[in-house]
Amino acid sequence: MLPLPWQETLWDSLNSSIDNGRLPHAILISGPSGIGKMRLAKALAQHLLCQAEMTKYACGSCKGCQLLAAGSHDDISILEPEEPGKPIKIDAVRGLTDSLSKTAHQGGWKVAIFAPAEAMNINASNALLKNLEEPQSKTLLILVSHRPSLLSATIRSRCQQIPMPIPDTAIASQWLTEVTGDQSAVDKVLFLASGKPLLALDYLQSDSLQERQNFEELVANVRAGDISPLDAAQKCQKLDASQTIDWFSSYIHRLATNDLADKPIPALFGFSDKLLQARNWLDSGNNPNLQLLWEELFMDWLMVFAARR
């Protein structure tokens, strides 16, 4: 696996740290979802586990690379929630940290990836701290985070932080065009994805773009009074709540910077704050009643425009 084109400068820096023996025991790769943070984490893990010498990237043909390709390399672990939106629990972290304390099966590096790291509940985070405070030799912990502010300050302070911004539009567009071969679709979808190339690629290769467009049509219908907040909330029951709130936030941003740019609505900014609060609530591991959550959001959304009717 190779890093993505907009990650090359960062990749060169990581390679330099490896070559000079200065790679830290823990790194925190942070930034918005859909820009390739997990791709970078896996590329780095593969590079460390590759048994070829003096290469910029993993060779893809040595025993280490073949084991990785087969999914049977014992010196890499990826810790993710069992289901989207669920927390990473303490037992999973303890099991992983126990395995990290043992000798590497292939005699080289051991790598553990936590994604997203903010999914760890408080007990899981505390269990991880011991490894961060007492690192093992030739062991790398990679924390991948969409929202690093949700991690404890103690964990953040014990990692080398690698912030990853949304890539330059031209680079992202060129990469998407090479992957898909459809320049006209790329420009439109990259805009809808707020410049996030992997999210745009998902839109082009799955049904998620249609799902998003259906949701935005629902939001517009609530605003126009064509559907009630209660009925709209019912239609959101089977959607991923965190992702859908992100769609809502992006919709509002486009509305504020385009259709309403010359006639701003102050209440729109207050509603954006409510969406952020709802997102934080979901990310904190709470299990809210989604029907009630969406009913409240849609009723507040309707009130944003009530004074203008």
Image (spheres, grey):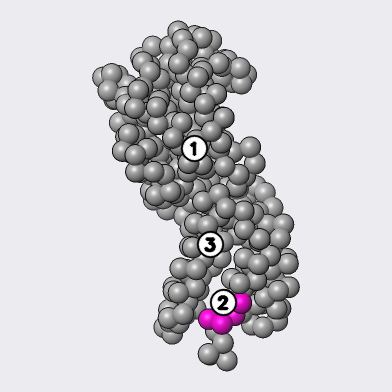
223 falls in the magenta region: no
Disc 1 element: helix
Mark number, residue 300: 2
Q: Nearer the viewer, residue 230 or 261?
A: 230
Amino acid type of the residue tagged 1 in the rendering:
Asn
Q: Residues in magenta?
A: 299-304
Q: Residue 209 occupies which quadrant of the picture? A: bottom right
- Read off the residue under disc 3: 278
Q: Which amino acid does the dot numbered 3 rest on? A: Ala
Label 2: few (<14), some (14–19) or many (≥20) C-alpha neighbours in 10 Å: some
The secondary structure that dominates the magenta segment is helix
Earlier residue among tags 1 and 3? 1
The residue lying at 26 percent from left, 19 percent from top is 20
3D distance between C-alphas at marks 2 and 1: 35 Å
Q: Are marks 3 and 2 in contact (CB under 8 Å)?
A: no
Instruction: Report x, y in % for residue 275.
Output: 51, 65
Amino acid type for the residue under numbered disc 2: Asp
**Does residue 197 lie above or below 220 as drawn?**
above
The local secondary structure at tag 2 comes to helix
Q: Is residue 270 above or below residue 68?
A: below
The residue at the point 65 percent across, 47 percent down is 205
Residue 198 appears in the rendering: yes
When the figure is inspected, residue 202 is found, relative to residue 212, above or below; the finding is: above
Q: Residue at x 30, y 31 (%)?
A: 13
Circle 3 crowding by C-alpha within 10 Å: few under 14, some 14–19, many from 20: some
The residue where tag 1 is placed is: 123
